[in-house]
Amino acid sequence: MRATELRLGNIENRKYWNPNPRNPDWAIEPCIIHAIGSTTCNVVIKGGEIIKLHHDKIEPVPLTPDTLEKCGFQRDSFNAYNLSINHFDRGIKILSFSGDYLYLRERSHKTERADDYVTTLWNKDLIGQFYLHELQNIHHALMKKDLKIKL
């Protein structure tokens, strides 16, 4: 991973050697970015310990239905995952992830059947795989607060 992609508080996967005597192998577990350097990061691992990792030992977390649900997204009848991010006087803003696209939808209270504005924030065909840290960064840019995630 590149340091420029990361923000403090991002959740990533750390790759580490698991010396289990029965089946030694590389393992992956979630970690939280605590400090970012040019070639290494300090991360918080399970149990609250802070360790230093080289960027090549940090891997992005792909967005899956399970990951989206841990972020508070709910699946709708069209198999898209939605998260209400901002209620305002005249309506609501919703982040909507369809698997191929991430949309920002703005819906007026006056028209409950259709979205008034839809903005595409990410397109799989143009950008490729979408990861949890990118969703966290977009949420932070839109809301000025961290996305709540239940690990």
Image (cartoon, rainbow, N blue to C red):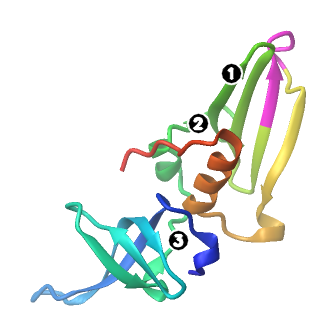
Q: Give the residue displayed 14% in from the left and 85% down from the top.
A: 20
Helix, strand, or loop for circle 1?
strand
Q: Give the residue displayed 53% in from the left and 56% down from the top.
A: 64
The disc, 2 or 3, on the residue closer to the chain's N-terminal end is 3
Q: Which residues are magenta?
A: 105-113
The disc, 1 or 3, on the residue closer to the chain's N-terminal end is 3
Q: Position of residue 106 (x, y in %)?
A: 81, 29
Residue closest to the eye, 132 or 5: 5
Type of amino acid under label 1:
His
Image quadrant where residue 88 sits:
top right
Give the alpha-carbon distance from disc 2 to disc 3, as whole Å: 23 Å
Helix, strand, or loop for circle 2?
strand
Q: Is residue 150 left or right of residue 87?
A: left
Q: Give the residue displayed 85% in from the left and 27% down from the top.
A: 115
Question: Which residue was labeled with disc 2?
Answer: 75
Question: Which residue was labeled with disc 1?
Answer: 87
Q: Is residue 108 magenta?
A: yes
Q: Is residue 45 above or below residue 93?
A: below
Type of amino acid under label 2:
Arg
Q: Give the residue displayed 31% in from the left and 84% down from the top.
A: 16
Give the alpha-carbon distance from disc 1 to disc 3, as whole Å: 30 Å
Q: Is residue 9 magenta?
A: no
Give the alpha-carbon distance from disc 1 to disc 2, as whole Å: 19 Å
- Labels 1, 3: front one: 1
Residue closest to the eye, 38 or 115: 38
Q: Is residue 54 left or right of residue 97?
A: left
Dot 2 and dot 3 residues touching (CB under 8 Å): no
Q: Is residue 52 left or right of residue 59?
A: left
The numbered disc on residue 60 is 3
Q: Position of residue 148 (x, y in %)?
A: 47, 42
